[in-house]
Image (spheres, grey):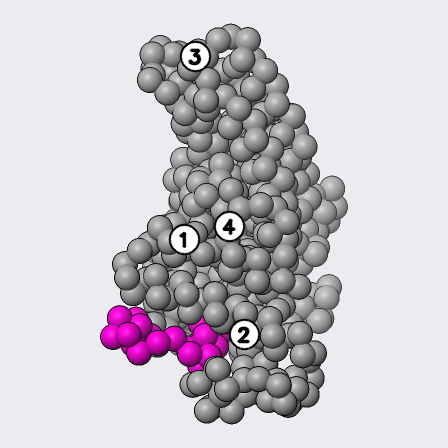
Amino acid sequence: MFDNLTDRLNSTLKKIKGQGKLTELNVKETLREVRMALLEADVALPVVTDFIAKVKEGALGQAVQTSLTPGQALVKVVQTELIQVMGEANEALNLNTNPPAIILMAGLQGAGKTTTVAKLGLWLQKNQKKKVGVVSADIYRPAAIKQLETLAKDSDLTFFESDSSQNPVDIANNAIEAAKKKFLDVVIVDTAGRLHIDDEMMGEIKALHAAINPVETLFVVDSMTGQDAANTAKAFNEALPLTGVILTKADGDARGGAALSVRHITGKPIKFIGMGEKADALEPFHPERIASRILGMGDMLSLIEEIEQKADKKKADRLARKVMKGKGFDLEDFREQLEQMQSMGGVKSMMDKLPGINEVPAHLKDQVNDKALSRQIGVINSMTMQERRAPDLVKGSRKRRIAAGCGQELQDVNRILKQYKMMQKMMKRMKKGNLTNMMRGMKSNLQGMRR
């Protein structure tokens, strides 16, 4: 997400970073380019206009003008205003009520409500240790009920059955009563997708809201719809007392206009953002972290949290001890590293959070392909344990046997061996404590992650 905006803003702000003095002229030229970058990212015009006015005021203010590095001070102003536009800080769900706390999900058809219901349930279960139940009140799409049942089973959530012949209010009330008997903490109610211009459907969800009185009413919106997402959220907010927004499919949008428009237009906080298709690809929306990503500064806090939650700490500790004792890094270790990356959403999702990743040439970043992870793991799985422990054995006829065993080409085997050697060098640098040298190795490692 934000790839296009990040590239444009970085190239624009880089020009002014080196300026010894900010003048009205160079600030005006810079902000003209920033304005174009935001509009191209499909940020709503009122948001852009307000944002530029505030940045200009800050850029020509005393603190920036008297700074020893005014260009960098201007970048700080831009960062501060980006955070302001998106809501300053993450606003958590308010579940302070007699259980079960009821969460009502609303939105357009195709926005990803049903999958988001399951993702949110799993997030609450894993991160807040809540016992969560889910129910579908979508009586217009029977497949939605079955879909939620399957997702709930996969995420070990309590699923309450419903039928398209029932009334949505009855469905929700029955689920809430059943949840009380099971002593559940939260019930998430999925609803049918509807257009804000459909009076009958909007009347139905208003009646449902009045009947169950949810503590959270969340609007689920597809971030790929850009500024239209914000306008639709505003229309829903006029009909329902929304408490927040969840942006979905953010991993598929290189622009980011929705994230920068929703809060300003609706006045409602973005509480979560969906960053992929996997069940755990939902994360709290932190404006300050997102602003850092937009400006190419990375998001180490989110990366550390992700590693804490998803990495196998025992395997990581074992590898660290092994490397520090000088026992070497073999292909079995490399396979474990690839599997860890896969469990954390792949290389792409991690790259976005690394500081300075915008300095890596675009053609190298484009060569990173997460689908290659499965193929690379397949190559190593086709080797014998002896070959994994002693990679120098893998030559000639062994390479051909390995390629045939995993249904890949000889060049794929050669490529994984090349990447392994790069990683082995990085591990040796890490053993010596030379972090600078290890970071230099990242560029060549990215080059190895080809399609």
Q: Secondary structure at mark 2?
A: helix
Q: Residue at x 27, y 58 (%)?
A: 433
Give the CA distance from mark 2 to mark 3.
Answer: 51 Å
Q: Identify the magenta region.
A: 317-344
Question: Neighbour class for label 1 at 10 Å: few (<14), some, many (≥20)?
Answer: some
The reply to whether discs 2 and 3 touch (Cβ–Cβ < 8 Å) is no
Instruction: Identify residue for label 1.
Output: 439
Instruction: Identify residue for label 2.
Output: 417
| Viewer-nearest of discs 1 and 3 | 1
Ranked by sequence position, the earlier of labels 2 and 3 is 3
Ranked by sequence position, the earlier of labels 1 and 3 is 3
Q: Residue at x 49, y 36 (%)?
A: 295
In the foreground, 137 or 149: 149
Name the amino acid, label 3.
Lys
Ranked by sequence position, the earlier of labels 2 and 1 is 2
| Viewer-nearest of discs 4 and 1 | 1
Name the amino acid, label 2.
Leu
Ranked by sequence position, the earlier of labels 4 and 1 is 4
Question: Neighbour class for label 4 at 10 Å: few (<14), some, many (≥20)?
Answer: many
Question: Neighbour class for label 2 at 10 Å: few (<14), some, many (≥20)?
Answer: some
Q: Is residue 91 above or below residue 112?
A: above
Instruction: Identify residue for label 3.
Output: 21
| Viewer-nearest of discs 4 and 2 | 2
Instruction: Identify residue for label 4.
Output: 352
Magenta highlight on residue 339: yes
Q: Quadrant of residue 256?
A: top right
Residue 147 in sight: yes
Location of the C terminus (image quadrant): bottom right
